Amino acid sequence: MNKIAKKRTKRVLILLFTTLLLLLVLTPFFLMVLTSVKSLPEILSPKFKVFPEKWIFSNYAEAMQRGDWQRYLINSLFITCTTVVLSLIINSLAGYSFARVPFKGRDSLFFLALVGMMVPSQVTMIPVFIVLKNFPFVGGNNLFGAGGTGLINTYAGLILPYIAGPFGVFLCRQFYMNFPASMDDAAKIDGCTRIAAYLRIYLPLSKPILATLAVLKATQTWNDYMWPLIMTNKDSMMTAQVAVVTKFTSEVSIQWQLLMAATVIIILPMFILFLFAQKYFVEGIVTTGMKG
Amino acid sequence: MKKNCSKISVLLVCLMLLGLLSGCGNGPASSGPQQEPLSKEEMVTTDSLEESKISDEPVTLSFIRAGTDEHAQAVYTELIEEYMEDHPNVTIEYQQYNYGAELETKLNTLYASGSAPDIVRAPISTIAQRAEMGQYAALDDYIDSWAGKDDIIQAAYDVGSYKDQRYGIAINIEASFLFYRKDHFIEAGLDPEKPPTTWEELHEYAEKLTVREGNSVVRSGFSIPVGQGHTVIIPFARQNGGQLVDIENNIPVFNEEQTAEALGYLASFNLDNLIIPFVNNQDQNPFELGKASMMIGTLSNYNTLLASDVEWIEHLMFAPMISRETRSGFGGCQIMFMSEESKHKEEAWDFIKFLFSDDSVKKLVADAGATPVKTGLADEFLESYPDIGPTYLDALTYCEGMPKVEWAALFEKYLNIAYEEAMYGQKDAQAALDDAMKQLEAEMAE
Amino acid sequence: MTLFKAKKPRIGHERVGYLLITPFYLFFLAIILLPGIIAVINSFTNYDLYKTYNFIGLDNYKALLIDPLFKKALLNTLIYSVLYIIPSMSLGLLLALLLSGEGRGSRIFRTGFYMPYIISMVCASTIWLWMFDPAAGFLNQILAAMGFEASTWLKDPALAMTCVVFVSLWKNLGYCMLINLSGIKGIPAYLYEAAEIDGANAFQRFKNITIPMLQPTTFFLFITTCISSFNVFEQVNVLTNGGPMNSTTTIVHQIYIRGFSEFKMGYASAISVVLMLIITLITAINFKYGNQGQDTNIG
């Protein structure tokens, strides 16, 4: 009987510990939401109260009136969705190829892709900007990429850098490496080409990794701030993340209540996405994370 | 089966290409909230002599403004709309960015890629660098042939010049002076009609006004930043007779005795535990949060306090900057520049002139808290700002900005390093300045 | 039904592989590799982000060797990495062990711990900037209410780096937990059962089964965490901007400052080349000792 009592105490202690830790971790979120319904003088007053005197839900409406938020959110949504879809196709194909298809120079090409990930974006930002600006045949450019503005201020200009990253390829490669060689042999015996094998055998089994990749890419793209700041200079092309940073901070003050309200709003899509994909998430990383 | 496989693969590739091509389309066609339908009408202008140079062709100007203050934004948007109504063939694309990293990143990207903005409203801090690199256009010819050139106060030309050429005209001069709380003064037994005028008084008052709980300051006597304090050390150094830079020989001299004394004086405010630490341009000044009794402020700070609806606004009082050998206050400015690479210089200049017209300046003064940079508008200004107006106009006479050298950014960086080290008591003021000088000189030598 | 195409392919070399990686590689070349090479070339110039562009050989690198700010940044980055990697990996492991159950309770807890990861670093840093504010911040309010002295947190040179590390930990804890979780889920249950029958207690089971079986996961996590630590930038930029007194400036922060505020893009490119070499070294080690997809299941 002692053992059972001990086990129960242990369970209670563990529960206590994790609950406390969770509360600690989530406290900033609670504060953020509470701040978003306070008035600015109240936030700035020397006396601190956790709960607001008056619950000012109009902060949300007011925050959304600072600029064309409908446009900003649609921009972010479009860019994120397109990035995710294109990434899924391109990265999984490449990952599959690096993992299952033997060809000359495969591993060197893969390592090169990995090395490319290591140059920090701060120094590639300007060259990428120039490359996109001088993209031939778009945005008024001629064959040599001169004369117009190229891909600046376009959706394509924002999406391209996001789908060019090797991280997704790396992830997919690790996933596809876990399948036994016998699967490829069976496919070969059936007369399938590599592409057919991918479509008929691997793709149906790829749900976990595709879901994982989708969530990771979506988060990364939705949350990015630097690229849209540089790549666009029209208000109509601004993304939600850039708007949050620029619309509520002026040279002398920060409108905390509006800033928090806007932040809550742009967190929501990612939160919903994560809840929805949680099942795939844990499943997905099960197969990739462990195998290095 | 093989045929099916290859068909599928072709389909896949086509889908990919389609996806790419659809993404390649341009973004929405509108170029900002102020898009007006274009029509080719004759322009109606008042200054016909100069109009002959301006074309009737549709022209798009890009205008980048530093600062995201919403009052100023509203006024600029209104002015832009007005201008575009009068000049239907001109479209002005307006963008604004926060000071500091955001603005500089944006400008650097644009200049580096050959997409220079036509008109820039930027702070004085990078004028030397950008003028030296040839990014800003020299405006002397334009100004000289301008009928209204004498209506602008001389200070507005001075701050915008570099090496005897005028590159910009200040549209807003942020002269700084002393803000203080009447109620705190009375509470501490000080006479609100007798604000501090010397260094000693300032320190004495700060000691009386500081409130602590245990060892932590909950209300600062005189609130100065612990970091990025160049806007504080520069005027105090000048008050003490310091030069900071030797313009003629183009070298820094800020480790001089007078500046070291000033820095030591400022550091004593932290070392004597009289301030709540904050970093300039990153955090809000505790004074604005009601947690300090005195600070150095500008007209924008005043407008912000009005807008934040603080309950203690009626206890706010103003006084001139402290003086020692001379009186000196920091004068940040917003300057209108034009890019050398602009393809529509005439049109850009025309818009700049419009911004400096009497009506525009009046609007900016009344609604955006800008300063009256035109002679003859002083009375109207005092009407709009009866409390703070006189102190501000007075401050215009003794304010001075960053030294205009092309290594201004480095100067600011190393001065701030020394400032921080002295404030935190890591080094004594003279040593901090000496070290900073050495590092600055080393970097300049490259 | 034929097994071969018209031309007999070499065994172990199927050209369709190139086709499959082409879409990715094209974008990669244009957006990552090409600008990367440009950046490396820039490191040998005095490019100032405008019209100056002259080759100056190794001058930037020579200047790097004697640059006190770069050395400080390097040191800070190492300190950050140590302070961050150890707690994040151990806490991540601990949480994963505690929350590896299937029940709804575990799911809720997992979601909760994962939440900070899904917001952007800019958002997270903004919230924490407010929490850490010496004048009006939440933390100081709590301290005051409990009767303790307020701290200046991010303005205190001795404390600033710890605060930055704390924010990173808060944000990435859920992710570390999740990776460890996946590793744990991959350990076959019968190993534990067999050990229990043999009389091993909880600690012995942990030491002899969990830890070795997690080795590939741990290594993967370790290397990727190392790389992201060396690249730390956004939270430094928002929370402290490198201060106070350069106690939190990091390598990438220096790259940013040099390149964008001081117009010394050539120099910034040189710093980034050095950073790239460091990270490549770490990754190469990973490739040598880490798993490459071999199945390590026992039995």
Image: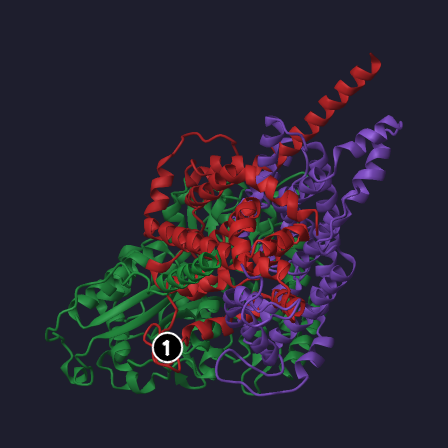
Chain colours: A red, B green, C purple
Q: Is residue B430 above or below residue A268?
A: below
**Which kind of residue does numbered mark 1 sit on?**
Gly
As rendered, which of B151 and C210 lies closer to the eye?
A: C210
Spot occupied by residue C21 in the image (x, y as percentages of width and height)? 55, 65
Can residue C152 be seen here? The reply is no
At 71% from the left and 81% from the top, the residue drawn is C62
A13 over C71 or under it: above or below: above
Expressed as whole percent of the image width and height from the top left, the position of residue A284 reads 60, 44
Residue beneath label 1, please? B168
Residue in the foreground of this view, choosing between B315 and A167:
A167
The front one of C123 and C202 is C202
Q: Residue furthest top?
A: A1
* In this view, A122 is above or below C299: below
Image side of residue C92 versus residue A161, left or right: right
Taking C237 as reference, is B431 left or right?
Answer: right
Which quadrant is home to the N terminus of chain A?
top right
Residue A181 visible here: yes
Q: Disc 1 on helix, strand or loop?
A: strand
Image-based side of A94 in relation to B358, left or right? right
Residue that extends furthest to the right in the rendered view of this protein: C199
Residue at 61% over, 74% down: C269
Q: Quadrant of residue B146?
A: bottom left
Report in which chain the residue with disc 1 lies: B
Q: Position of residue C239 (x, y in %)?
A: 58, 53
Of residues C279 and B325, the one drawn nearer to the viewer in this rendering: C279
**Residue sitting at 37 percent across and 48 percent down?**
B306
Where is residue A283 shown, x and y percent of the image?
60, 40
